[in-house]
Amino acid sequence: MPQNGEVNTRFGVYKAVCCGAEIVISQGATFPDCPNHARRITIWQHFVTHIEYRRLWDLAGGRTKQRSGSKTTFMDAVFVMASFTPT
């Protein structure tokens, strides 16, 4: 898993292992320090895959139909997707 100061090799949503702080970082950008633990080693875990991004964008854009009475929001979907570890 990448650490602060390293160059990112793939775009994505990452979560700090130390406290769960989340960032979106593009390929080629340098991983930052954890916003909650500055000047300490931060390990960043990638937690949303490309296929999941498409589903999230469709949900956010209203292109995915929800069941009648469903109150699922984009942030709910992000929370659910965060529980999956890419293989």
Image: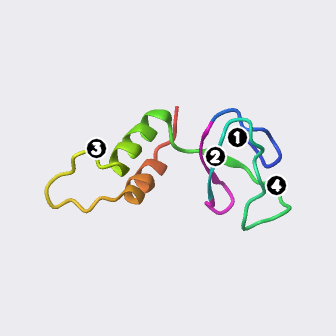
Q: Residue 41 carries which label?
A: 4
Among the 4 quarters of the image, the one containing residue 70: bottom left
Frontmost residue, 61 versus 55: 61
Does the CB distance between marks 3 and 4 fall below 8 Å? no
Of callouts 3 and 4, the N-terminal one: 4
Label 2 – label 3 distance at C-alpha:
29 Å
Frontmost residue, 87 versus 54: 54
Label 4 – label 1 distance at C-alpha:
12 Å
Q: Which mark is residue 63?
A: 3
**Residue 3 at x, y percent in the picture:** 77, 46
Q: In this view, does 2 lie to the left or right of 65?
A: right
| Foreground label between 2 and 3 | 3
Q: How many residues crowd mark 2 within 10 Å: few (<14), some (14–19), many (20+)?
A: some
Q: How many residues crowd mark 3 within 10 Å: few (<14), some (14–19), many (20+)?
A: few
**Residue 51 at x, y percent in the picture:** 43, 33
Does the CB distance between marks 1 and 2 fall below 8 Å? yes
* Residue sitting at x 81%, y 64%: 38
Mark 1 lies on residue: 1
Element class at badge 3: loop
| Mark 4: amino acid | Ile
Mark 2 lies on residue: 45
Label 2 – label 4 distance at C-alpha:
13 Å
Does the CB distance between marks 4 and 1 fall below 8 Å? no
Label 3 – label 4 distance at C-alpha:
40 Å
